[in-house]
Amino acid sequence: MKKIVFLMLALLIALAGCRSDSTTNSKEKESNNDQSGGTLKIALNAQPPTLDTHLTTTTVALEVTRNIFETLVTQNAKQQPVPMLAESIDKSEDGLTYTFHLRKGVPFHNGKEMKAEDVKASMDRWLQQSSRAKLLLDGSTFEAKDEYTVELKLQSFVSDVLDIMAGRGQFPAIMPKEVIESAGKDGITEYIGTGPFQFVEWKQDQYIRLKRFDDYAAVDEEPSGTAGRKTAYVDEVYYYIVNDPSTRTAGVQTGEYDIATYLPYDNYDQLKSNKDLQTYVSFDAGTLNLTYNKKHGLFADQKMRDAVNTALDLDAIMLASYGNKDLYKLSPSYMSIEQVDWATDAGKKAYNLADPEAAKAKLKEAGYNGEEIVLYATRDYDYMYNSAVVIKEELEKIGMKVKLEIFDWPTLIERRENPENWDLMTVGTGYVTTPSQLLVVNPDYVGWTNDQKMADLLASIRTAETQEKAKSGWEELQAHMWEAYLPFTLFGHYSNILATSNKLEDLTVFQGAIPWNVKKVE
């Protein structure tokens, strides 16, 4: 077996790859109990559909549940996978076996110590329930070798195993074996994890209440992303369900809430000028895109896709969508621009061309003859609607006949499944941890990507021997997507706006506000 080396990560972010002392010592417990007290009140934009992390990709569910549950590996601030409940990880020479050595003395919220049987039960269920795991780790198995060792066996070598396990949506939370065994078809019935806060109650459509877990087993490493030391200083955290954005905005301004999430872009300047608030622009939201229907109609022809891509002024589209240049960034990178292992500007020569005259020539070459183009959008997300209005205007300037059809989000989701209904559609996509998880490369996702070179390059990325070779392959694939195939036109990367009371100290914003390590000062 050869040890997976996390030394480079440690040099970059001062995170050690594993703990020398696997038990929680008294100093760590004293740190976790050195609390400032008080209640942290957070306004969410929606109610989570479930708190069962194996079943949901919803962002609001992630923000709540990562306080309750932890995973074998998690993401540091550079979105790289590092150990959390695993103390260390071994990888076999052939890359088919991963051995996770568990931290000892880590208690669940019910007082039971986390052991290999709990990890196996949790990971087995995740492999069964997570669509990402089923697609990317099909045939994999977990086995408990002893009380503190779990082995993962793969059917074939892939290089992105730890990235997948550290992913955001449907993350593989470790729970007690008995909680897993008692889960029904609708999910788990008890929310018991190893995190710094434990579940207390959920009043539907009102709030979710958590309290500090006094016996939390913290690691003695610098905080980074969702990795490292987690100290619960506040007594309780309330996640209030506040659907109306104006209510969330007003609530954080009056002090009703300490933190308000997903605030309207139109309120950015107002919030930023308020001296009683701290306003955060967090570029961890995702990308705004135009997807082409490549299964049916005009845009099955790459020349038509190329003409549209050539015409669009992406800066104008993003400004109309978000209203302020602080709130978006232009980049051809399909992966997060802050994800150091994958971000690239490959294909940039086909990005943001904004050349209507060249687009007219390409449209003529493609044989376009005034056929009606159906563009789907929704008013449920203002940025999607606003972008569609600009797209319609710009395409009409090059001679295209565009019909903008607007639906509520559930109706749009239903109608877009039929390729005969539409030609173009605006869509926002969240970030993922590896290129293999991108919707744009998934042939089953609406738009129906179908390109053998893309499939071959994606397979080579997943089987690359080193991260350097994997990234090189991804650069080739992204360049091919932009310059030769065009499954999407990616407009840019957009932010979320989050505002907090200035009474909070040491708040970290990483894929939302992190409640641990925060002190509330009255």
Image (cartoon, rainbow, N blue to C red):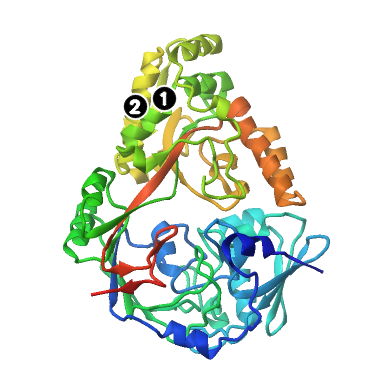
Specify the label residue 313 is tagged with: 1
Quarter of the figure that contains the N terminus:
bottom right
SS at badge 2: helix
Q: Is residue 406 visible?
A: no
Give residue 220's quadrant in the image: bottom right
- Under mark 1, the amino acid is Asp
Circle 1: is it few (<14), some (14-19), or many (20+) Cα within 10 Å? some
Q: Residue at x 52, y 45 (%)?
A: 337
In the foreground, 123 or 341? 341
Residue holding disc 2: 390
Circle 2: is it few (<14), some (14-19), or many (20+) Cα within 10 Å? some
Q: Is residue 505 left or right of residue 229?
A: left
Q: Residue at x 28, y 44 (%)?
A: 265
Give residue 445's quadrant in the image: top right
Give residue 393's quadrant in the image: top left
SS at badge 1: loop
* Circle 1/circle 2 CB separation < 8 Å: yes
CA gap, disc 1 to disc 2? 9 Å
Quarter of the figure that contains the C terminus:
bottom left
- Under mark 2, the amino acid is Val
